[in-house]
Amino acid sequence: MTASRPYQESREEMERLLGDERVGYLGLSRDGQPYVVPLTYGYVAGRILFHGAAAGKKLDWIRSNPRVCFTVARQFGDVVPHPQGAACQVYSDSVVCYGTARVLDDIEERRRALNTFNQCLAPGAKDLTRDDVADCLAVEITVEEMTGRLERDSKCTWLTHRFAT
């Protein structure tokens, strides 16, 4: 965090945005190379859940370096016109989460996580069985810290929360 910014402790505001949005951007790094991929996710109590194929680049990178960054953002309206050299105003919200990703290899743990993921995306969705999740992979990110930014009426509010470890 930048020391000059007046960060406010506000887990609730950031969790509201994480709960409202459905697409986020997963940032990975391996051998000094960045890789960012958009994905559908669910957020519950300090955990980000997503699913995917049982093999691929994203999983290779997570297994190589499980330290990840995950971002969601939304913009309200257009960029506000401003004179040359003045601050650019875009009314928006964003959250950046830092944590550790874990591939859920155990089928029962994966089934529970995918049911939670489904409930985030479609409340009331039917529970998945072990057979339903046999060929699907699940990943859980344990969020350790998150920062956020809310911009309204030419004013920015910076948010922060660090989870107990």
Image (cartoon, grey):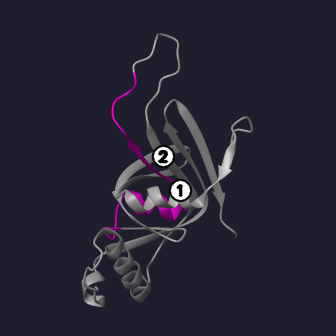
Q: Position of residue 84 (x, y in %)?
A: 47, 10
Q: Nearer the viewer, residue 78 or 73?
A: 78
Residue at 70% in and 38% down:
2
The mark found on residue 94 in the picture is 2
Image quadrant where residue 110 sits: bottom left
Measure the alpha-carbon separation of dots 1 and 2. Answer: 10 Å
Which residue reaches farthest top? 84
Magenta-tinted stretch: 51-80
Queried whether the magenta region covers residue 64, the answer comes back as yes
- Is residue 67 in view? no
Q: Position of residue 112 (x, y in %)?
A: 40, 84
Q: Amino acid at mark 2?
A: Ser
Taking depth in this image into account, of 26 and 162 the one nearest to the observer is: 162
Res. 101 visible in picture? yes
Circle 1 residues within 10 Å: few <14, some 14–19, many ≥20? some
Q: Residue furthest front?
A: 153
Residue 67 colored in magenta in the image: yes
Task: Depth check: give the residue in front, 13 or 134.
Answer: 13
Of badges 1 and 2, the one in the foreground is 1
**Height in image: 41 above or below 147?**
below
Q: Are marks 1 and 2 in contact (CB under 8 Å)?
A: no
Residue 22's place in the image compared with 158, above or below, is below
Q: Is residue 135 left or right of residue 65?
A: left
Which element carries disc 2, helix, strand or loop? strand
**Under tag 1, what secondary structure?**
helix
Q: Amino acid at mark 1?
A: Glu
Looking at the image, tell me whether mark 1 or mark 2 is earlier in sequence order. 1
Q: Quadrant of the C terminus?
A: bottom right
Residue 152's disc is none
Query: Can you identify the residue that label 1 sits on?
Result: 13
